[in-house]
Image (cartoon, rainbow, N blue to C red):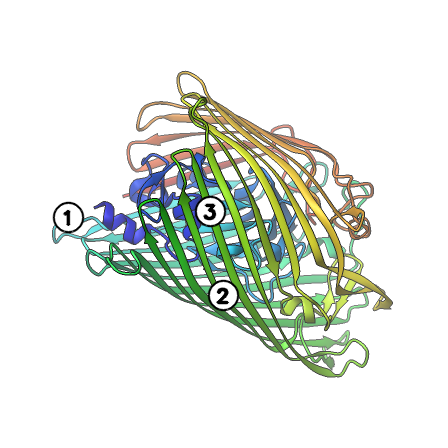
Amino acid sequence: MNRIKRLIYLPLNIGWLFSCSAFGQSELLSLQAANIEEVIITASQSRRSLVELPYSAHLLDETFLARQQPRNMPEALNNLPGVLVQKTANGQGSPILRGFTGYRTLTLIDGVRYNNAVYRDGANEYFSLIDSQTLAGIELLSGPGSTLYGGDAIGGTLNLITKAAPIDQHVNDAVNLSGQQSYRYSSAEQSRISRTELAVGSQTLALLVGYSRKEFSNIKSAGLGEQPKTGYAEDAFDLRIDYLVNDNWAMTLLHQTLQQDEVWRTHSTIFAKSFAATSVGTDLRRVKDQRRSLTYLKLKGEDFESIFSAIELTLSSQSWDENGNRIKSNAEGIVDYFDSRMNGFDLQLYQTFDNYSLVYGVDYYQDQVDSGRVDQNVDGSVKQVRVQGPIGDDAQFDIYGAYIQLDYTVTEQLNLTFGSRYTKIRIDIGQFEDPATAAARSISDAWSSMVSTVRFSYAFDVYPGLHFWGGISQSFRAPNVADMSRFGKSRSNETEIAATDLDPEYFLTYELGLKRRGAKTEFSSSYFYTAIGDYITSTPTGNIRDGLIEVSKTNSSKGAVEGLELQISYFLADGYTLSGNLTWLEANLEGEPMTRIMPFTTNVKLAWASNEDAGWWWEIGLQHANKATRLSAGDKSDTQRIPPGGTPAYTLFDMRAGRQFGDHIQLIVSLDNMTNEAYRRHGSGTNEPGRGLSVGFSASF
């Protein structure tokens, strides 16, 4: 049975480090193994605890996600060290990891690359286009991961593990049928979320099908009241089939789609409400409709006596369609769109020996992008058909990668990790609007890079459970289609034009950390310093276009990010746990602060759970963020999102409690923002909800 679980649920592809070398929570996160002790599965199939690994890593398992009831993907990460959750709008948001966001952080879904060629820097909506209701767990690897995962893994890498139905070899010829219905209501968010799941399992086949429906009315915020045009609707569907071919081979087929309708970027419109003297936008309308889908097929095998002991092959296909509608203050309109079609191939192999293990592989992703834009007169008639939409039209982005990583056990106390990746990237943009002539132009370019990492972990004999770890890692990111051909409004007072002469960015990160796991205490700390070279930033051209400052991307900056992350949990008597974390971050480019830098933030939580299988639990949480006063020039001019002088400090108190009734019914109640604090997270375009009540209910059979 253990082999079956490994084959079906162990992600052995590009996300292998999470499940095998960094987190190894695949069994823990699968539906049928929620109570298994936290372990990781190494390439040698031995077990090592998370504390032994030379990485800063965090896991949000299915129990955590069920109790926290996050409204969307960004909010699931709210309390993690080193993470600032920025929300452009109520339905649009992205995590800022160690000072980096957008295309300098990488997201994987079951190890499949989610970032595409239209991903951009800064405040964006892409992370919100993943349904958190479909997940059995979220794994965060903080810091660089380019050696195994490729170009965008600089600030951190998120691996999202999808839910799966169990395969059970003990059911004979019978078929197990199960299902779950959940519902969540929140008063201050004015949100309603429904999730329906049906699972079918047998000896060799398991199927899970799910549907999520989310309806959001306008947010009720402290001090501002109801914020107009912050509501939207979202539908998501997912299907996963796991098939055990034989004792050595397993196959997984997954499909998921998500659609958002009428998501407003309220901060840029006349419907925005000023917070701490932020300015109100001038657009009469600015909305987006989004639709994305992912389909992948995985073939996994293990226990081979050949040049590899395990193998995984993944074929994936993703689509991403965005439609925008903007009406400017003069009542003229802009209708634009882009369509992205990305196909991927991942092959990863493993080999184990007496005191070392090896993982190596190749991957290839190709993204094809089309875009368009029509400018409209006041009466809705066509004023001009533009050469391109928000990014270049008829574009292709190819990423080729080959990598190898060696994990070597020197002694019982000392473990070393070495890894390297070669990447080649080619970009072809069929047409984009020339900034000087407005005529159609095309461009092609290519880059290559080799990055490496060296890491260690050392266990102290005299202090059992204490581990010292560190590493030096290179990272690399090549310009993508959005960098080179973005066209249209970006920040509050900026409009962006194409950049045709860009080079890759380079990063070098140093990390040191301590971890300890004892009977009563868990502790982890990490210090990191990332040197930045050839950083791509939006730079003013000196021109004014349509009343906005014209900017274009350039390799204009070098600088550094450094920070400290601490996390501790203390297990008290009688089911009580006291835990907390803090983050300090400093980042500068060319002597001035980097944009949207996370202020000093701390989280504290007291939790209690009964020892009974079906019992009560409760928790009280506090989050405090200092005033965000370290502002870049772009932050200071982004007056619709960032108040003059910086985003105000805030302190939040939340309380939630739940009860499990038998094996099939669960009730969760939370009091959110109990002091009715008026706040927004730094860089966001909307205020968060005020005091509110959230109620969640789930029933299974």
Q: Secondary structure at mark 1?
A: loop
Which residue is under mark 1? 171
Left or right of 659 on screen, residue 442: right
- Distance (Cα) linking label 2 and label 3: 20 Å
- Distance (Cα) linking label 3 and label 1: 42 Å
- Distance (Cα) linking label 1 and label 2: 43 Å
Of residue 682 and residue 67, the one placed in the foreground of this image is: 682
Three-letter amino acid code of the residue under disc 1: Val
Of residue 359 and residue 541, the one placed in the foreground of this image is: 359
Tell us which disc is closer to us: 2 or 3. Answer: 3
Residue 461 against residue 248 in the figure, above or below: above
Residue located farthest toward the left when viewing the structure as drawn: 172
Which residue is under mark 3? 417
Of residue 565 and residue 85, the one placed in the foreground of this image is: 565
> Residue at (70%, 66%) from the top-left corner?
326
The x and y percentages for residue 629 are: 78, 39
> Residue at (48%, 50%) from the top-left corner?
418
The mark nearer the N terminus, 3 or 1, is 1
Residue located farthest toward the front when viewing the structure as drawn: 410
The x and y percentages for residue 255 are: 39, 62
- Neighbor class of circle 1 (other Cα within 10 Å; few <14, some 14-19, many 20+) is few
Q: Secondary structure at mark 3?
A: strand
Left or right of 175 on screen, residue 419: right
